[in-house]
Image (spheres, rainbow, N blue to C red):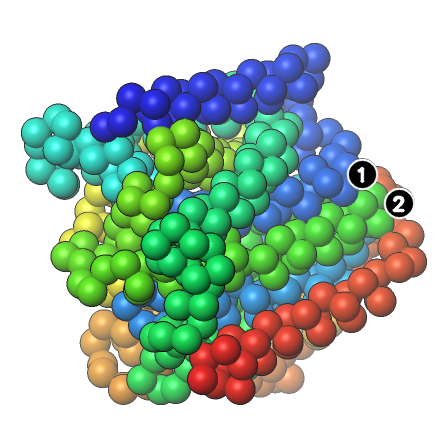
Amino acid sequence: MNATAFITFIVVTFLVGVISWFKTRRHKITTSAGLFLANRTLSFTAVGSALFFTNISAAEFVGSSESVYVNNMTVMAWGISSVFAMLVVSEFVIPVYLKGAMSTTPDFLENRYDPGTKKLVSFLFLISYMVNLLPIVLYSGAVALNGLFHFSDIWHISYGSSIWILVWCIGLVGSLYSILGGLKAIVISDLVLGICMFTGALLLAYFGLSHVGNGNLQEGIHTILTSKTEHFNSIGTSADAVPFSTIFTGMILMNLFYWGTEQVIVQQALASSDLETSQKGIALACAGKLLGPLLFILPGIIAVHMYSSMQNTTEVFSRVVSDVSPPILSGFIAAVIFGAAITSFSPGLNSASTLFTLNLYKPFKEKKGRTVTEADLLRNSKRFEMFASLLAMFIAPLIIFSSDTFYTFMQKINAAFSIPIFTIMFVGFVTKKVPPIAAKVGLGFCFTGYILTQIVFDTGIHFLHILAILFLLTTTIMLIIGKLFPMEKAYMAQNKQVVDLKPWKNRHWVNGLLLLIMILLFVLFSRSGIAT
């Protein structure tokens, strides 16, 4: 371990923590709204940075670089195409949530269907967070840090043992951050770390390209643009990790779910002061997503020109940073990676706690006839966060046994929970009389169908296409049930007038520009562009 790199890592991490404390020291958490929604006072920069950095965990650095090194830039489609989904959510979904003063996305399901559907979906969200989202964040952070500092060599222990130790270190720090600081502290850290991340990415690109060019930046750029250019291709075939056709089937559905339904993401937008602020914040997050090729994919391209083979491809990003960066930059990037892990883990915990406390614990107590105070909600939410974090820390190291590439594994597990929930949300948005029983049947059918096609039967069809087929079948079943057994009274959304619902007047031309850039990026990284 390089002493300079490690000292830089400690100093930068400490400074981010101090800045977050300084900016939130007068923000006393005395209510559940303060813990979960920062009292709905976030600015558009805070919303945008929180949305972007909550989405960007160490998994993005680790998974994207590995996928580009092993395959090509088809993995780029996940981040770039999500811009379309984010703008759809900004225009049509967020206004509904804010209009109903909703604290969690399952609140919509209670209004649209019934309390039972809300509880069922809240339970599925919690399972997803504790066995998938939180463990993946911890594991990817541990892999990246071990690759940067080589703790397994320093401590003279196995690779697996070092991952266990690092998972628990990240998990404990992230738990304290969420429990003590709440959402306000998390979004302040996101803003600071966002600036650090873009700075680190630019510096890493400079040193990486210079390394490929034997000390000459221009020669490095020339090298990656003229050799092994097939790795620049983002238009995938059926043989690639992400076939281009999947963008228009399962991928768009998963992106719509993630940005419009996933509690850990939507909660950031719901904490905005009004609709205009939320829409500006989402547009800012879109701009960040469009920079994804520079941030997460270029290190993989650089690795292609540095290493003919690697035994452990999950360490592609970490090895590039270690081999091309001066010690100060290595420590700086390690601090960003650690911060990314913390500020993805902490919002995940905060959102899981929100779902448990408001959607399960509070209704259960009130059903028993007991009065639930704010102090009681805060106390039990923090207890649940401790339980969820401990469970995630036990599960995370087991991901090492996955046979898929890390990014593919992560998306396949996400899909098991996302599409069933998204489908019943979608039907709830576009219909008025489909009954609660249809939502419950739809959840069961879609979830069971996905598990059978991925574990029991080998269909030979890409899992994203399977998701689109299940979405259509589930929607059809729900509509048939709605036709046969419609609700007596049509659903009507209520305006609770908690925040100003006036939309951002400049959103259309800004959104159009963002979509144009999205399309141009696919053209640039294709065989018609630089992947010739």
The residue type indicated by label 2 comes to Asp
Residue visible at 13% across and 40% down in the picture = 159
Q: Amino acid at mark 1?
A: Ser
Nearest the viewer among 166 and 149 is 149
Query: Badge 2, how many Cα within 10 Å: few under 14, some, many 20+?
Result: few
Q: Nearer the viewer, residue 170 or 314?
A: 314
**Would you name the residue on which mark 2 appears?**
500
Vertical arrangement, residue 9 with respect to residue 312, above or below: above
With 124 as the anchor, is 455 left or right in this view? left
Secondary structure at badge 2 equals loop
The picture places residue 264, in percent across and down from the top left corner, at 54, 45
Q: Is residue 57 above or below residue 364?
A: below
Q: Which residue is mark 1?
A: 273
- Look at the image and tell me in which quarter the N terminus lies: top left
Distance, label 1 to label 2, CA atoms, is 8 Å
| Left or right for 513, reference 386 | right
* Sequence-wise first label, 1 or 2: 1
Q: Quadrant of the C terminus?
A: bottom left
Give the residue displayed 72% in from the left and 66% down from the top: 514
**Image point 22% across, 81% down: which residue?**
457
Q: Position of residue 166 (x, y in %)?
A: 26, 32
Q: Is residue 291 left or right of residue 411?
A: right
Instruction: For residue 20, say whether it is visible.
Output: yes
User: Dots 1 and 2: beta carbons under 8 Å?
Assistant: yes
Residue 50 position in % (x across, y down)? 62, 41
- Residue toward you, 229 or 403: 229
Q: Which mark is residue 36?
A: none
Residue 505 found in image quarter: bottom right
Mark 1, secondary structure of its residue: loop
Which is nearer the eye, 356 or 366?
Answer: 356
Q: Residue at x 84, y 66 (%)?
A: 508
